[in-house]
Amino acid sequence: MKPFTRLDADPTVLHGNMGPAYPTVATYAKDPRFASHTQLAYLELSTTAAEIYAQYCNTIALVSGNRGQPSVFIDQRPLDPPLQPAGNTTSYVRAALPSQPLGRKNVRVFSGPQMSPVYPNMTEHHGNHLCAVYVPSGDDTEVVPVPARRPVVPYGDSKIAGFWSLSTGRDSITFLLRERGIPVVSFAAGGWTLHAETGSTLSVDACLPLARKLVECLPSKIILEMGRNDFSSVKFAPSDLIAQLNNLLLAIHQVAPWIPVELLSWTREVTESDRAGVSWAAMRASFLGLATGKPWVSVLDAARYWTQAEAGSFTSDAVHPNDRGQELISSAIAGDEFPWTPKRLGSLFAYYSAEGRLGGSSLIGAVTASGTSPPSITVSGTALMACRVRVEVNTGGTPGGAMKISYSFNAGRQRIRQNVAVPANGVVELAPLGVSVTFSSATYNNLHAYEFNTCVAQWYDLSGNGNHMVVPAGNNAYSPEFNPSSSAFGRRPALAFTPTRRLRLTGISLAAPYTLFLVGRCASQASVRAFFGRTEVGSGLLFYANTATSVAINDEASQINANVNATLPHCYILEVNGASPKIIVDGVSLPLTPNSTLSNKTLTALSIGSDAVEGWGLDSDVMEAGVCSGVLSQDEIDAIVARARHRYRLP
């Protein structure tokens, strides 16, 4: 047998490990089999070897399915399948390393997912530990040192540990974040509880040992997801659980006041039965409420990443997030866009977004020029899409001479053309937009630039149902202007309406009850402003700012009012439901005056930005809008609002 060299999985060289100290419990004292005491920690090698042997000590019988399968990665790619150590024993597992063109390979050998953390209360049924790696003695192998980067530390149970994903050795939140270049030290473990860490004494002092361990590796932030198992198994009374979680937050801030904490709420499950008379929704709200008054604590509301109705699609066993669920959670932790979209609503009839498909118009917004005494330009033609256009002079001169320009759409994200010569007639077609710019015979210099917005003649339905909004009678004079950066809505793109511009949807028949939603505002409430309106008498309803302090739904037979400052950015959800109508603003169902019954008239047409019957028009931005059949569930409403708050920086 060829000679091999043993490389111990010492905690000081393990990447993604909580710290260099061994457990102090007597049965584990200085035992290298338990060196890998953080789940999914790994030993990284740079080697020319064609094979390695990994030594694992498994302290739990389960080594397949939802836990226990460690991975080996070669140059950032996993070997398939994951390794299969024997259960409840020490075993040596061979991994053949494919050859590489340059001979040397980057190899990461991982510990497996584990069933409990070690501090302060390690358990015997811990999981799968990497003890050592054996490499052929004749090959060139180096141990890659642990970088000094500050990691993210997730602390929680099996959900954030990644159990029940398709392959827990590679598909968990930890791996997904590492793929993005985010270092992670995972302090999550299957079946774990806060009670096991702190005991039953409710105090900051009881939480200090755990807090000190969480900050030991100087994390960039801590993701706190703990408490679900405590609530489900009633380890604490619900109010005591919230109190102890609050104590933990205070303990973390006491030992490391510079480290931020993000509260990650418990994801939705197929079955959520009350515990001790308290609902899951109430517990989640109390958990996220712990951020109030703590500037070092922020919120990631994972309960809004999928709804109750979708839980079967985003969990693998009705409880734990599957691969799709893990991807949504990791993207939220990484700071991506909110991981839920209205396009997942099962009752969606139509959905429109200013960041979706926008058909262009012959109506062009005002041209803004910059530079010293810039000569004028003229824009003409019909744009194929609505966008922001920038035209810059690269080489000064006159048309037909040395003059050259460049142009781009939407801050350069869609198309850039550079060094385009300007012909003698001064006309340059901005391909493929469909509009042309005409330069005068004046002299231009390379400090001159021009920007303008094209307008929207068609707002495409993103639901897939083909219910597109268009300008009335094909008249482009009604086209709202594309605004690439709405200052009131987090600098996101918007449709900018004026009182004479609107889009409409006709030829539909949607019976009540139904639900409308819209994110927008009006610039002034001194005049009547319509968000949704009719295309003709009897076509549907009107939702408008009817006074300086209120908004209303009017269906021509009755009207309900609610007090709202509509000049502020809001997410509106309107339930047209006979005797049970609602006006929901930023998640709050408002008192209605009078508390009337709507006629439940069938919706046969709908306008956005104006009411064609009365001529009441909007004077500001709309970000998105949608129509659903029926009444939405509470968690669907919560998801719409949570996304709007995240996306548009609503209060």
Image (cartoon, grey):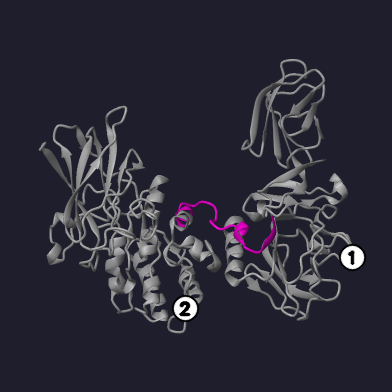
Q: Give the mark nearest the N terminus, 2 or 1.
A: 2
Question: Which contiguous range is marked in magenta?
Answer: 329-351
> Where's residue 188, x and y in %?
33, 61
Please state which amino acid type lies under the numbered disc 2. Answer: Ser
Image-quadrant location for residue 540: bottom right
Q: Is residue 293 above or below residue 498?
A: below
Of residues 587 and 98, the one nearer the viewer is: 98
Please state which amino acid type lies under the numbered disc 1. Answer: Val
Of residues 368 and 100, the one nearer the viewer is: 100
Q: Is residue 326 magenta?
A: no
Of residues 516 and 51, the one nearer the viewer is: 51
Query: Measuring 67% from the left and 53% from the top, which residue is drawn there?
Result: 464
Is residue 467 in view?
A: yes
**Disc 2 versus disc 1: nearer the observer:** 2
Is residue 220 in view?
A: no
Give the secondary structure at mark 1: loop
> Where's residue 23, x and y in %?
18, 61
Name the residue tied to disc 2.
273
Give the secondary structure at mark 2: loop
Image-quadrant location for residue 539: bottom right
Query: Measuring 80% from the left and 17% from the top, which residue is drawn there?
Result: 424
Q: Is residue 553 above or below residue 339?
A: below
Query: Measuring 79% from the left and 73% from the top, which residue is drawn there?
Result: 600
Total numbered labels: 2
> Where's residue 78, x and y in %?
34, 44
Query: Measuring 69% from the left and 65% from the top, which residue is drawn there?
Result: 572
The circle on residue 537 is 1
